[in-house]
Image: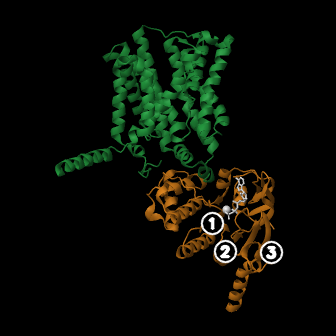
Chain colours: A green, B orange
């Protein structure tokens, strides 16, 4: 919205988005991730890559799920199609970067066409429809063996170089995608599109009546939520060198990405970045320490989110929390003193 | 008869219910026209048909010479056909100012957010909501929400404004203020169709009145003629009101 400071007073993060401090923190965070090839071992670099790619996808999801308020679970479909288009293009001799670009465009087109149908649904129906898309695409890819290799999967030409060089390249590409997604978020947040999407989020009928072409706006948001996931998928395929339908169209991925965005604060500019960072680090911690409980803990985070953090980490009013805490302490003390 | 807004044989059926049945009328530019009728007569449905919320079962809507029968609500808004909702429809978490700016930016003339905000401030001042510009719309009282609804539709720079019970829930003093506002809006050259249950209000402000009953237009004309119309008395006003109105009328003469 306009740069004159008249942004929504309610959503703190909209104000935060113009705070230089938040941008400095982001620069530091990206710098830290980018430095992992120099500082850490290959395991650390893997974590950094995971963070970068999931941040890109959480930022993407934020366009439709956060700004627009449509609870989409189609991330895995976009990611998976990106994997396959990228892989197939490369196998047919198309150069790496062109293959990645092709995957991006294909996924954006797919989302725009799909959006025309699926965005007529609202609320729970949209959520169910969007998750069904993942299953349908997975089934098609599994059954279309002659092209996709079916359940056997596909080998993807490996990136040139030793394992460390490859990791570093993948990391920098994923970071670039993440920053592109962030740049798009900032532009949307400040522009006409973001304002229109927020109107749709809060009252779609009123948005329509005020002159917003809601269908077009929602399709734009849905395509934006797909685009970067397509690139991430194609780069991921090049990184791992082998893809199959179960791995590419994973239901776990489709649930994780919205949870990351919600954890940080859906509809905010920095929320998906914070949420993904916290989520991946927690996951790594639990993964390393309680291997068997990993999934249970993911479930636990989701439940915690729903009950205690409906607005996400960035929407918490920390000052009030602190005041309440102090007030409670004081009350306790005076109660003790009275006894 | 041309008119800025013309309805030709407009009908709407919801399943078996004929909510609007073969309604034809025209609004002349700059007029204030009252639309009255009992609860469930089809008044709100008619507004929904004009603005493209529901598709028509039959008939045609012509706005400024163009057939707009199949338009979508957002197209109506951009063409200059604005409406207020009987049940107010704010963007609850946005500030009052942003609500009105949305109307200006998407439905009106401004190209930039800064222009839209300026326009929004002007309309807020006009309806008297300026002191509340920064408060969230969700925290407004009902009368203020009605004012917000009005400011939002004015920011869209409408040629025709359809007001669906903007005065409902207001007290006598507030209604006088609202009527003054509506007169000023008309003075800007905006054509107004006002749906209103309070006869005192309709009679004092309308140059012409349309009466809807069971989805059909049963009378149309000058306020005095409509009030004395037998069909209207039977369907809507009741004999008592007619008698009282006649007395008052003759007392004035
Ligand atoms: N979306 C809808 N679906 C089905 N029936 C509807 C719909 N909208 C209105 N109706 C029916 O159409 C008829 C006319 O309703 P409408 O709301 O237009 O009346 P109204 O004149 O505005 O009444 P009020 O004075 O109470 O606002 C009613 O019988 C109503 O139940
Ligand atoms: Mg009504």
Q: Residue at x 36, y 31 (%)?
A: A27
Identify residue for label 1.
B165
- Which chain does tag 2 point to? B
Identify residue for label 3.
B231
x then y, percent, for residue A264? 42, 35
Q: Earlier in the sequence, mark 3 or mark 2?
A: 2
Is label 2 in a helix, a strand or a loop?
helix
| Same chain shared by disc 3 and disc 1 | yes
Label 3 to label 2, Cα distance in Å?
A: 18 Å
| Same chain shared by disc 2 and disc 1 | yes
- The reply, left or right, for residue A229 in relation to residue A211 is left
Q: Badge 3: how crowded within 10 Å, few (<14), some, or many (20+)? A: some
The quadrant in which residue B29 appears is bottom right
Q: Earlier in the sequence, mark 2 or mark 1?
A: 1
x then y, percent, for residue B75? 67, 51
Q: Is residue A253 above or below residue B138?
A: above
Disc assigned to residue B228 = none
Label 3 to label 1, Cα distance in Å?
A: 23 Å
Tell me whether circle 3 and circle 2 mark residues in contact (CB < 8 Å): no
Identify residue for label 2.
B202
Is label 3 in a helix, a strand or a loop?
helix
Label 2 to label 1, Cα distance in Å?
A: 11 Å
The quadrant in which residue B197 appears is bottom right
Q: Residue at x 56, y 25 (%)?
A: A76
Please tell me which residue lies in front, A311 or A75: A311
């Amino acid at each position: 919205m306009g740069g004159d400071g008249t942004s929504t007073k309610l959503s703190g993060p909209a104000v935060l988005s113009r705070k230089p401090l938040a941008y400095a923190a982001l620069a530091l965070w990206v710098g830290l991730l980018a430095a992992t090839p120099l500082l850490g071992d290959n395991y650390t670099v893997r974590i950094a890559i995971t963070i970068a790619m999931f941040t890109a996808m959480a930022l993407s999801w934020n366009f439709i799920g956060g700004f627009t308020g449509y609870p989409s679970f189609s991330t895995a479909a976009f990611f998976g199609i990106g994997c396959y288009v990228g892989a197939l293009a490369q196998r047919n001799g198309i150069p790496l970067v062109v293959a990645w670009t092709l995957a991006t465009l294909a996924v954006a087109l797919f989302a725009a066409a799909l959006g025309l149908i699926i965005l007529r649904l609202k609320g729970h129906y949209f959520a169910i429809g969007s998750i069904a898309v993942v299953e349908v695409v997975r089934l098609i890819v599994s059954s279309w063996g002659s092209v996709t290799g079916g359940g056997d999967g596909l080998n993807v030409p490996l990136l040139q170089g030793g394992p460390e060089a490859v990791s570093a390249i993948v990391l920098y590409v994923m970071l670039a995608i993440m920053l592109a997604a962030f740049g798009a978020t900032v532009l949307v947040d400040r522009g006409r599109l973001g304002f229109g999407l927020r109107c749709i989020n809060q009252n779609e009928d009123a948005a329509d009546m005020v002159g917003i072409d809601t269908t077009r706006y929602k399709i734009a948001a849905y395509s934006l939520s797909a685009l970067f996931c397509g690139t991430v998928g194609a780069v991921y395929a090049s990184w791992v060198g082998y893809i199959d339908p179960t791995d590419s169209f994973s239901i776990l991925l489709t649930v994780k990405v919205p949870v990351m965005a919600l954890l940080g604060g859906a509809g905010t500019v920095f929320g998906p970045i914070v949420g993904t960072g916290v989520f991946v680090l927690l996951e790594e911690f639990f993964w390393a320490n309680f291997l068997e409980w990993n999934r249970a803990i993911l479930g636990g985070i989701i439940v915690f989110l729903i009950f205690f953090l409906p607005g996400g980490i960035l929407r918490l009013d920390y000052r009030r929390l602190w005041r309440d805490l102090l007030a409670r302490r004081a009350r306790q003390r005076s109660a003790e003193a009275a006894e | 008869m041309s008119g800025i807004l013309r309805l030709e044989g407009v009908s709407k059926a919801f399943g078996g219910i004929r909510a609007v049945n073969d309604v034809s009328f025209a609004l002349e530019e700059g007029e204030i026209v009252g639309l009255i009728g009992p609860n469930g007569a089809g008044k709100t449905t008619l507004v929904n048909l004009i603005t493209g919320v529901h598709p028509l079962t039959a008939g045609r809507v012509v706005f400024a010479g163009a057939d707009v029968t199949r338009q979508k609500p957002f197209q109506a808004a951009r063409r200059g056909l604005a409406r207020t909702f009987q049940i107010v429809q704010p963007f609850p978490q946005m500030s009052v100012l942003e609500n009105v700016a949305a109307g200006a930016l998407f439905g009106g003339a401004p190209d930039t957010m800064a222009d839209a905000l300026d326009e929004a401030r002007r309309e807020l001042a006009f309806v008297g909501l300026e002191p509340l510009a920064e408060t969230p719309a969700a925290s407004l009282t009902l009368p203020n929400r009605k004012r917000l609804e009005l400011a939002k539709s004015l920011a869209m720079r409408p040629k025709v404004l359809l007001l669906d019970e903007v005065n409902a829930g207001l007290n006598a003093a507030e209604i006088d203020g609202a009527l003054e506002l509506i007169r000023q809006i008309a003075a800007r050259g905006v054509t107004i169709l006002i749906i209103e249950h309070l006869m005192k209000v309709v009679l004092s402000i309308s140059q012409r009145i349309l009466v809807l009953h069971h989805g059909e237009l049963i009378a149309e004309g000058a306020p005095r003629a409509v009030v004395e119309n037998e069909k209207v008395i039977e369907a809507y006003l009741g004999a008592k009101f007619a008698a009282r109105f006649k007395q008052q009328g003759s007392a004035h003469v």
